[in-house]
Image (cartoon, rainbow, N blue to C red):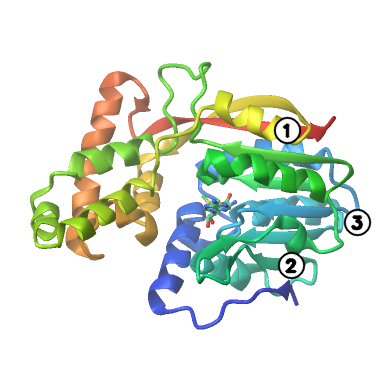
Amino acid sequence: MASGWAPKNLNQNQVADGEAYHCALYHQGDIHRPAKWHEESVSHLLELAMGGIRDGSVVVDYGSGTGGSAIELLKITDDLGISIDLVLIDPLESWFGKAWEILCHRDDVHFKISTAIDSGGNVIFRDLEEMLGPRKADVIISSSTLHLVPLKALENLAKQFARCLAHGGVVVWNSGDVECDWREENVARLHDPYRAIREHIRNHDSRLEILDSMESEIATKAERRIDRIFPEPFSISDMIPRIESAGFSTELSDKVVDFHEQDAERFILVPRLAGIAAPLLAGDLRDSVIRDALAIVMERMREKGSCFEGGYRSHWVYGLHRLT
Ligand SMILES: C[S@@+](CC[C@H](N)C(=O)[O-])C[C@H]1O[C@@H](n2cnc3c(N)ncnc32)[C@H](O)[C@@H]1O
């Protein structure tokens, strides 16, 4: 049995949200049938990570979500007969609850929820050292997560990573949603279509009608919340100095991953992500507004060249960091 955090009292919507994201990564939720984009984007990350993983290694998965990266890593180590201790860390109970459901039967997996409430009642991120205790990590992976960490918090997070690594340990991350000056013109950033959908439906009649009926301050706050679902991507040239300020060296690599339109639809209809159409409520209208917008956005991207018939090309950047 896994140790650490376990989901408690998740409501129906939270369970459905975790299930939907899991199904965006795995066809019909079957962990043996990963969506191509998930399999292809995480495989290079895990190749890099495996360079530092031996029998008995402690591995941290920072931003585990529903378990997509952990599941793929454990497939590799199980196949090789390598035994590791895998610490999963995430702030979002709904998605993390799904990871727990899939992996809780394993003694070698440990769950840590990364948020806590401070004395003033505010939600704060817990320090990695506090979550790991005396354990040091041989490898820290962070799959599709660092673009969600605000730049102002990244420097501190990198310092936490540095303090938690065992001698010779490495940090390996990937992201499909960072900006860099070597991305080819016919390749998009992972979340470009979803930012474009947000823009496309910003002035949708039914949305505006509900916003107009709200107090203006509440409506403004709601709009800001929506903009934070797919924020403008950070630039690699802003991220790397912050990571290196903790004493890390950097090796970057990249990969172009095809994202099929049906996978994009499953992805953006995950309730938490479909929140880009709020205040439209979950249901058929919201889903059809998003579906229609996706088709239009894809067509526009096709005209510009970053879409092929049936999908779009996404650019993934991989960082490997060692302490110097
Ligand atoms: C796209 S998911 C990636 C999940 C998993 N690693 C995978 O590859 O499928 C990103 C995860 O990062 C978590 N996250 C969001 N903001 C974060 C932050 N500021 N710090 C740490 N994790 C965060 C989310 O809860 C989410 O589960």
Q: Residue at x 74, y 37 (%)?
A: 47
In the image, 44: left or right of 77? left
Q: Earlier in the sequence, mark 1 or mark 2?
A: 2
As measured in the structure, the alpha-carbon distance from the residue carrying label 1 to the one carrying label 2 is: 24 Å
Q: In the rendered structure, find residue 320 and report the number of the disc placed on it.
A: 1
The residue tagged with tag 3: helix, strand or loop? loop
Q: Is mark 2 within 8 Å of ligand 1?
A: no
Which residue corresponds to mark 2? 110
Q: Residue at x 79, y 57 (%)?
A: 78
The three-letter amino acid code for the residue at tag 1 is: Leu
As measured in the structure, the alpha-carbon distance from the residue carrying label 3 to the one carrying label 1 is: 21 Å
Q: Residue at x 51, y 41 (%)?
A: 37
Q: Residue at x 20, y 54 (%)?
A: 288
Disc nearest the viewer among 2 and 3: 2
Q: Earlier in the sequence, mark 2 or mark 3?
A: 3
Q: Which residue sits furthest front?
A: 120
The residue tagged with tag 2: helix, strand or loop? strand
Q: Earlier in the sequence, mark 3 or mark 1?
A: 3
Q: Position of residue 65 (x, y in %)?
A: 56, 58
Q: Quadrant of residue 287?
A: bottom left
As measured in the structure, the alpha-carbon distance from the residue carrying label 2 to the one carrying label 3 is: 14 Å
Q: Are marks 1 and 2 in contact (CB under 8 Å)?
A: no
The three-letter amino acid code for the residue at tag 3 is: Gly
Q: Residue 36 versus residue 197: which sits nearer the camera?
A: 197
- How many residues crowd mark 2 within 10 Å: few (<14), some (14–19), many (20+)? many
